[in-house]
Amino acid sequence: MLKRFFSQFLIDLGELEGDYRVFHLRDDIAQTILSLSIAIISVLAMLRVDVILFKDRPEILMWVVLYRAGFVLATLLFMLAIHRTTKVRDFDRLLLAWIVLMILFFVVFSFTRPANYVTTAFEIIIPLSIYVLSPLKLKYNLALALGFTAAMLAAEYFFKAGTDPLIVNARLTAQLIVHTLGLGSALQIQSYRRKSFKAYMFEKDAKEMVAYLANIDPLTESLTRRQFFIMAESEFLRFSRYRRPLSILVLDADHFKNVNDTYGHHAGDVVLRSLSLVILEQKRSQDIYGRLGGEEFGLLLPETALEQARVVAERIQKTWEQTPTNMDGEMIHSTVSIGGAEAAQDDKSFEDVLRRADRMLYKAKERGKNQVVVE
């Protein structure tokens, strides 16, 4: 029932629920540490009241001071553990344990106060703080806040003799108002946080999509020429620094103009898309694949010597030769010529390697196409 009630006010994030908590974890930890620090200061500040109440009973005052010191020490340990945690589940467990400890501390401590001692300030501040400051799920905060109030009222009404019924009724009214305002505030805060996170994720996804579309050729799903060269230059710098093998293949569809002239440009697009799919299926995840222009593609192979690159090229060449393109029931047969080169120590830039691979591509064309030539 509570879940149905809260769902009317809070956005259901679905699969993003876990990401939402992780996204806010560091902020929640910082806020919790601040809240625990304030709690420590508040508990220590009450020592002045203890001195006034028990100035004639030093033995009780000593135990009260030790009791407060124990709470402060436990809170400091919780602060240290919360500061070090990196998981949402661990954070939730630690915070839940501390709130329970705090509730027990104040409930037990209320028995040291006279029946006519007014503790309404803490009875209001604590449940309101749980609602507003605790990042736990609302159902947990609601149970903790109501549990604290019920325990405090029970201590006042059932275990303390001489409490004025008027004061008890006033406290009941105050608690009703506090829980109403606290729950309303918690719903607004949680709703705002969830809406803000969802808007942030939508914006992030939109930016990533724009960046993806800007770097991907829409027809062939390969990298654009600009993005291919950016990544290729980065790989060449890595080659220059560590002298790890680096090879490149330049691929060009054979007789592509004849395909366009015979079947139309739409058929040419379908052929290019099919060729690109074959290349994508043969490449490794670390290989860099892009469209250099027209029907020409580049495949950069990090950590790959020339002979290994030849094997990849021949696999692509033979696979494409045996993969006709179906165009409205008519099978279009096409081939590909491939030139390859390996980065050498005297190469000054990626352009030097690409230039040699281009020369090998032209040799493949001159030798009759549909073949692989590497240097």
Image (spheres, rainbow, N blue to C red):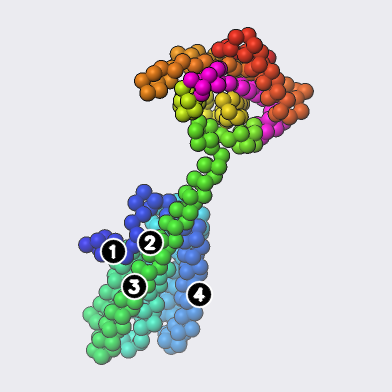
Question: Which of the two residues, 57 or 274, is positioned nearer the viewer here?
Answer: 274
Comparing marks 1 and 4, which lies closer to the viewer?
1
Q: Compare marks 2 and 4 and give the one earlier in the sequence.
A: 4
Q: Residues within 10 Å of mark 3 (few under 14, many from 20)?
A: few
Assess whether mark 2 and mark 3 are in contact (beta carbons under 8 angstroms): no
Q: CA distance from mark 4 to mark 3?
A: 28 Å
Q: Is residue 58 something that shows in the picture?
A: no
Question: Which of the two residues, 89 or 199, is positioned nearer the viewer here?
Answer: 199
Element type where label 2 sits in the image? loop
Q: Compare marks 1 and 4 and give the one earlier in the sequence.
A: 1
Element type where label 1 sits in the image? loop
Where's the N terminus, which quadrant? Answer: bottom left
Three-letter amino acid code at disc 1? Gln
Give the labeled residue for mark 3. 184
Give the labeled residue for mark 2. 136
Q: Residues within 10 Å of mark 2 (few under 14, many from 20)?
A: some
Give the labeled residue for mark 1. 8
Q: Is residue 39 in the magenta section?
A: no
Percent x, y of residue 89? 40, 52
Comparing marks 2 and 1, which lies closer to the viewer?
1
Comparing marks 1 and 3, which lies closer to the viewer?
1
Assess whether mark 1 and mark 2 are in contact (beta carbons under 8 angstroms): no
Q: Compare marks 2 and 1 and give the one earlier in the sequence.
A: 1
Residue 41 numbered tag = 4
Three-letter amino acid code at disc 2? Leu
Q: CA distance from mark 1 to mark 4?
A: 38 Å
| Residue at horizontal 58 percent and vertical 21 percent from the top | 252
Three-letter amino acid code at disc 3? Gly
Q: CA distance from mark 3 to mark 2?
A: 15 Å
Comparing marks 2 and 4, which lies closer to the viewer?
2
Seen in the image, is 155 located left or right of residue 256?
left
